[in-house]
Structures are given as structure tokens and as C-alpha cells.
Image (tube, helix red, strand yellow):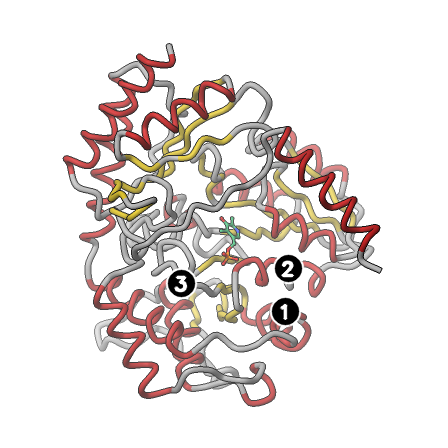
Amino acid sequence: MYTKIKDTLLAELAELKEQGLYKVEVPLSSAQSAHIDVEGKRVVNLCANNYLGLADDPRLVEAAKKALDEWGFGMASVRFICGTQDLHKTLESKITSFLHPVVQDEGGRPPFEPPALAGSQVQDEGGQWDTILYSSCFDANGGLFEVLCGPDDAIISDELNHASIIDGVRLSKAKRLRYRNRDMADLEARLIEAKDCRYRLIATDGVFSMDGYLAPLDEICDLAEKYDALVMVDDSHAVGFVGQNGAGTPERYGVQDRVDIITGTLGKALGGASGGYTCARAEIVEMLRQKSRPYLFSNSLAPSIAGAALATIELLEQSGDLREKLHANTAWFRAEMGRQGFEIPESDHAIVPVMIGDAVKAAKMADIILAEGIYVRAFSYPVVPQGKARIRTQMSATLTQSDLEAAVAAFAKACEQVG
Ligand SMILES: *Cc1c(COP(=O)(O)O)cnc(C)c1O
């Protein structure tokens, strides 16, 4: 029975290889870190989302072990049957207060007493906020839109949004409108186009991962106010290190109380294991707990991950050292690569794409740079637009000055060799 599809699959796989679209996985023989072992060689790692260098941090490993001992290995249940531990509720309220810190009064108490409803809410002047955990941010986005928006509504989405937003939007019956990447005039036109819909929901990545550009959330929130729309931001590439306290792009743009829904991952800066969340207006979260399918029908986050995530956020609340180191590394690398004549898109984010243009050249350069002991990957069409091939580097707080100098030297050498 398998013969027919097998032949087709083999032909299609061969075609992918021919077109250079076949994805090869390079196994690491070490922990994820600033330095990794690849094919028997220790190299500097410039391509993980390990922005704060926490993926192998002993403090998180210890917190995960402690949670394993105290809370066991797995939950073997979804949240609403018997998959909720105190640990999950504590993590949810920790994420809420991290993203929506309440101004403390003199007595150290929040100015409003949050009602006892779900036990993990935070209230500020804009209302109440709450957080719901998922197995991944892919699931958080997959389980969001369908719950909130129906055929009478419109979801207005940035054209470069992450695949999980695109898929989540597809699962809803709402009208789907797209605007050009960060183009506020185009967003306004789409809002006008959707003016007769019941609700309008603007959905955007906080940071666009191929360019390192931030979404202009202040302008987006202004437009949302003008046209009575909700705002949803996926802050996966920002939470933990963008904004003064690491609360992400809403903090950076001063709109923490104007973004209605934030989704994010625990799989990048926040330790890098796995897990995701939606932090939103309390009623939205309450409805997600009732109706969001990846939450209802997929297993609870493992206790060790929840315990380590909690420790991560506590660490980030106590000290801004890792954030500062990351920003210093990013600023130095961007400036030095610029001085060497490389084209780097204007931003200050830790995603630092080095624009090459030609896909073959980009791939050749990446090989040379790896041979020099710096692990980088080239990205070309269809991941990025035709003729915009690049080597995307990502900074990390645990990279040293000599790592960065070696990286710049390797880029310079590859550039010379490839021409
Ligand atoms: C990485 C990423 C995701 C997926 O997060 P997971 O927790 O790994 O599923 C979703 N959205 C954006 C914008 C991302 O960058």
C-alpha cells in the first residue's frame, strides 16, 4: 500500500535537494551554549535564540532538578482534568507580574487587591491581566484567534508574522487582512477596510526574526485606538531582554497597558527549553482556559520546565546584568561589522543579519566562517526575499569579547575569499 506515496515522497525530496531547499540538521555533541561542539570541533555559536545565555546556566539546571524532586517528572494530564500544580499557577502569576508590574505603594502592596477569581491575576489601572501556559508559543498562537474572532470579525496581520500566527489566524473564521511589514499607512488602510466588522484585531510579531526590526508598537496602538481595534503582539524574540526590565517590546515602546494580548515563548531567552504563554486581559485568558484547543487537548507543561522558568524570571527581576551584557555585545558587534563595511539592517536588536545578497555567496561564506570556528547559517529564498540572502547572526550575553573579535575576523576573511 505504501508504494505509491513512497515514490512521490522520494521524488519530492530529491527535488528539494536539487533546489537547495533541503534542510540539514547538524547534531551538536555538547549542551546549547555560547561555545558548542560541532563535528568534533569546538566553535563559537552565533545562531541560537539563547540571547541571555541561560540554556545551560547551572542555576536553571539546579531549579529544574529541584522541581523534578519536588513535583515529579510529568503531569500525565491536561490542565483542566488533573494537570494543574501550584507550580503552574505560580508561574502564570509570575509571568503576569513580569509583563505587567504593578506599581507598589509605600506598604509594598499593590494599589488594587486583585479579586480571588483565578488566583494568578494582576490588576493595574488598565484592568486585570492574567497568563495561561501552553506547551509552546506555536500552540499559544494556534489556540488564540479562533477563540476570540468569528466570521463577523477581522484579523489584520503583518505580512512577516511568524508561521504560528499565520496558522492560528487560518484556524479562525475571521476575515483575514494583511499589511506590509511595519507599514503604518497600509495598516490604517486595512483598518478602514475592516471598519464594519464587529471586532478588529491587529496581530504582529514584536521583533521580526529575519531582519531584527521591531514593530512600532506605539504607532500601532495609536491606530488601534483610532479605529477601535485590539492589539496582539508575539514577543518571542524580545521577552527577557528588550525593554528596561526585559518585559519586551511593549515596555520598550511604553505601551504595556495598551497591548491587549502578548504571546511568547520560554524556548528562547527565558532558558530555551520549551513552553509558551498568552498574557492578556483577564477575561480573554479566562475564555482561553475554556475554549483554547491546544490548552484543552495537549499535556501540561512538565514541572521541571515550569520550575526552571520560574527561576529564570526571578533571576531577571533581581539583576539586569545579562541584559546589559547582551546589549553591550550587540552594540559592539553591530558597530564593528559596520566599520568593516558589512551591510547590517538598522536596529539595535540582538538579531544581527549580515546582508550578502547572492544566495550562493552567502552559503560559501557561511562555510568559510564555520571553518574559522564560528558557527553561522546562511538564509536565502524562500526564507527571505529573492536576492536578499544573508547570514543571520544572533548575539548572546555569554559571548566574550574575543569570541566577537574572532567572529568579525572570520567574516572579513570569508568576504575576502568570496569577493
Ligand atoms: C520561536 C517563535 C515561536 C515559536 O515558539 P515555540 O515556543 O518554540 O513554539 C512563535 N512565534 C515567534 C515570533 C517565534 O519567534
Determine whether 270 is above or below 285 in the image.
above
Residue 202: x and y, percent?
62, 47
Residue 138 quadrant: bottom right
**Mark 2 Cα within 10 Å, few/some/many (few <14, many 20+)?**
many
Location of the N terminus by quadrant is bottom right
Determine whether 76 is above or below 147 in the image.
below
The mark lying in front, picked from 3 and 1, is 3
Q: Is mark 2 within 8 Å of ligand 1?
A: no
Nearer-N-terminus badge (3/1): 3
**Residue displayed at 32% across by 19% down:** 414
The answer to which of 342 and 189 lies nearer the viewer is 342
The answer to which of 226 and 130 lies nearer the viewer is 130
* Circles 1 and 2: CB atoms closer than 8 Å: yes
Q: Which residue is mark 1?
A: 294
**Mark 3 Cα within 10 Å, few/some/many (few <14, many 20+)?**
some
Residue 73: x and y, percent?
41, 83
Left or right of residue 15, residue 348 in this image: left
* Amino acid type at image mark 2: Gly
Determine whether 300 is above or below 177 in the image.
below
**Mark 1 Cα within 10 Å, few/some/many (few <14, many 20+)?**
many
Q: Which residue is mark 3?
A: 273
Q: Disc 1 to disc 2, how far (Cα)?
A: 7 Å
* Amino acid type at image mark 1: Pro
**Residue displayed at 26% across by 41% down:** 43
- Secondary element at image label 3: loop
- Secondary element at image label 1: helix
Q: Disc 3 to disc 1, how far (Cα)?
A: 18 Å
Nearer-N-terminus badge (1/2): 2
Q: Residue furthest top?
A: 419
